Amino acid sequence: MATAPNTNIIFPQSPFLDPMTGRPAREWMMWLMNPSYVGVNVSNLVPVVYGGTGLSTIPANGQLLIGNGTGYSLNVLTAGQGITVTNLSGGIAIKVTDTAVTAGTYGNSSNVPTLTVNSRGQLTAVTTSPITVTSSNVVGGATGTFKSGDAVQKTITVTNGIITSIV
C-alpha cells in the first residue's frame, strides 16, 4: 500500500514584510499563492521575527497578546478600584462599578445636596438638607430714606433683614 505524497510546502524562513517596501515579501507571496498548498505542518513555533507570536499556548477567554520587550505574553485585564472586568469568550467587558447613589436630580429651591466623593471621584452618597434662613443668619442692618412717586418721603428702618419701622 502506497502512502500519499506530502503535499505541504514549507513556509518561507524570512520576514513576512519586505523591509524596503513594507509589503509582504516575494517568498511569502509565492508561498501564499501556490495552488498546490493544502496545509502547513508547523512543528516549531513561529518566532516573532517571522510574524509569529513565539507562543504555543491557546488563549483563555479574555486573554490579550501583550508585548513584553522580547516577544509576547498572554494576559487578562485586571480590575482596579471602581472598575469591573469580565473576560468573555471573544471579548472583554469593562464597567464602572456601581455605587450606592441612585440616578436622579438632587436639590431644589428648598433643599441643597450634600455629596460624598471617594478617592476615585465617584459619588458614593447623596443626601439633601433643607435651606433655612432665620433672622439670626442675617447680620447687620440698614436705615434709609426712600422717596415714593410723590413728594412725600418715608424713612424705612431695617434691622437684621426685617423692616422695623416706616416713618
Image (cartoon, helix red, strand yellow):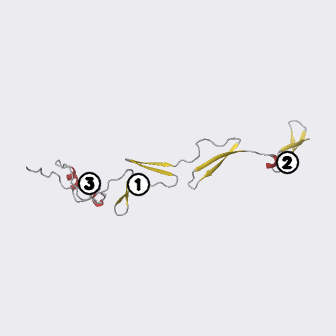
Residue 54, position in %: x, y? 30, 59
**Residue on which disc 3 sits:** 24
Q: Which badge, 3 or 1, is on the more N-terminal residue? A: 3
Tell me the mark number nearer the camera, choosing from 3 and 1: 1
Quadrant of the rendering where the C terminus is positioned: top right
Q: Which mark is residue 142?
A: 2
Q: CA distance from mark 3 to mark 1?
A: 31 Å
Tell me the mark number nearer the camera, choosing from 2 and 1: 1
Is 156 placed above or below 17 here?
A: above
Residue 67, position in %: x, y? 37, 59
Residue 153, position in %: x, y? 90, 40
Relative placement, left or right, of 74 versus 28 is right
Q: Amino acid at mark 3?
A: Pro
Is 52 placed above or below 93 here?
A: below
Asked if residue 155 shows in the view, the reply is no
Classify 10 Å Cα crowding around label 1: few (below 14), some (14-19), many (20 and above).
some
Q: Which mark is residue 76?
A: 1
Give the residue displayed 47% in from the left and 54% down from the top. Answer: 79
Please, which residue is most extreme toward the left here? 1
Give the residue displayed 49% in from the left and 55% down from the top. Answer: 80
